[in-house]
């Protein structure tokens, strides 16, 4: 049973991410947790706060959140009446990152699926602030779906790596099981100044090959000092349906995500982006 958390702010981008998840996992028995965390909204409406007590405003926002979640669930069941899928809606007086972290832990969530940008839809940013927080701090794989991205079967997946990370079986298994129904080809892209691998790198490469065994894998090397440019160029020159990266200490992804401001990133993604977190969690 696949467990999928989908945070929503009821924007078009959030609904688009939900639809992508429904399609991607249509062949799997899945539990979907549709979650809205509304604590920010309580304090955002200053005009309402000036007229009502905090308790009353909280009640108003809570009831609105529950109603919108119920409407979202009706839409989901209408567009995808899939007997393999079950749903639970969660309305929480909490911050999105905190609530996501809590649900991931309590429900042993396999993957979070969300839009790259939310209601504010700032097109100068690759990731919205909420998406970035979840990517950086919640200990679970995150699949981020660009605004207006129309579902395409993930036939060609790009996975840049330096082979220095001892990958986790659970997360490679997730990728394998996501890709295998679509007979996807996975390009493992080694970005380096040299094509020689150390013993440690070679061991990690073998481990990847063994754990992605259901899929066709191409091991490729690109000689480039600029990681983000190398990835961006590869995506543009090769029809790519999904980018996969690992977020861990001293990883490619960390060097991208932890810049002082996200809008300095040269990698402007217009395809789904799966961030594996490389953490120790209960086996699937």
Image (cartoon, rainbow, N blue to C red):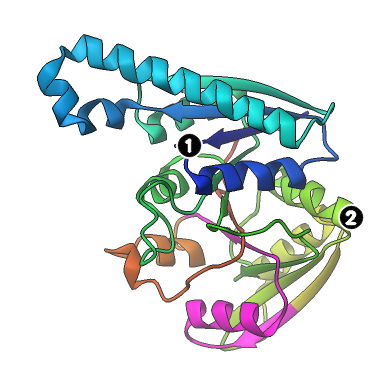
Is any part of residue 142 visible from this angle? no
Work out which quarter of the rendered image holds the N terminus and state it.
top right
Query: Where on the picture, by quarter, is residue 266?
Result: bottom left
Q: Which mark is residue 10?
A: 1
Q: Position of residue 32 (x, y in %)?
A: 66, 29
- Name the residue located 59 percent from the left edge and 38 percent from the top edge: 280
Q: Which image quadrant: the C terminus?
A: top right
Q: Position of residue 220 (x, y in %)?
A: 73, 80
The magenta span reads: 220-248
Residue 128 lies in the magenta-colored region:
no
Q: Is residue 89 left or right of residue 134?
A: right
Neighbour class for label 1 at 10 Å: few (<14), some, many (≥20)?
some
Q: Is residue 264 above or below residue 85?
A: below
Q: Position of residue 132 (x, y in %)?
A: 41, 51
Q: SS for tag 1?
A: loop
Q: Earlier in the sequence, mark 1 or mark 2?
A: 1
- Location of residue 272 by image quarter: bottom right
Count residues near mark 2 (Cα–Cα under 10 Å), then give few for <14, some for 14-19, many for 20+: some
Instruction: Report which residue position mark 2 lands on.
Output: 214
């Amino acid at each position: 049973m696949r467990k999928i958390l989908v945070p929503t702010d009821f924007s078009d981008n959030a609904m688009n991410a939900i639809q992508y998840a429904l399609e991607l996992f249509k062949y799997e028995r899945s539990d979907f947790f549709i979650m809205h965390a509304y604590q920010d909204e309580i304090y955002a409406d200053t005009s309402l706060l000036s007229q009502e007590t905090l308790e009353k405003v909280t009640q108003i926002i809570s009831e609105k959140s529950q109603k919108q979640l119920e409407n979202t669930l009706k839409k989901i069941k209408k567009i995808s009446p899939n007997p393999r899928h079950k749903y639970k809606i969660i309305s929480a007086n909490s911050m999105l990152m905190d609530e996501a972290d809590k649900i991931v832990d309590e429900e042993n969530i396999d993957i979070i699926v969300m839009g790259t940008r939310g209601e504010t839809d700032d097109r100068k940013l690759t990731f919205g602030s909420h998406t970035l927080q979840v990517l950086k701090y919640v200990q679970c794989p995150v699949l981020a779906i660009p605004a207006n991205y129309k579902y395409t079967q993930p036939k060609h997946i790009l996975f840049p790596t330096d082979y220095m990370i001892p990958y986790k079986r659970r997360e490679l298994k997730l990728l394998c099981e996501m890709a295998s129904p679509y007979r996807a080809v996975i390009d493992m892209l080694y970005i380096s100044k040299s094509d020689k691998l150390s013993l440690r790198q070679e061991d990690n490469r073998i481990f990847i090959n063994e754990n992605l065994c259901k899929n066709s894998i191409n091991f490729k090397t690109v000689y480039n000092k600029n990681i983000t440019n190398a990835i961006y160029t590869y995506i543009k020159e090769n029809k790519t349906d999904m980018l996969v990266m690992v977020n861990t200490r001293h990883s490619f992804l960390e060097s991208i995500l932890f810049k002082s401001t996200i809008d300095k990133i040269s990698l402007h993604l217009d395809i789904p982006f799966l961030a594996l977190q490389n953490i120790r969690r209960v086996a699937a």
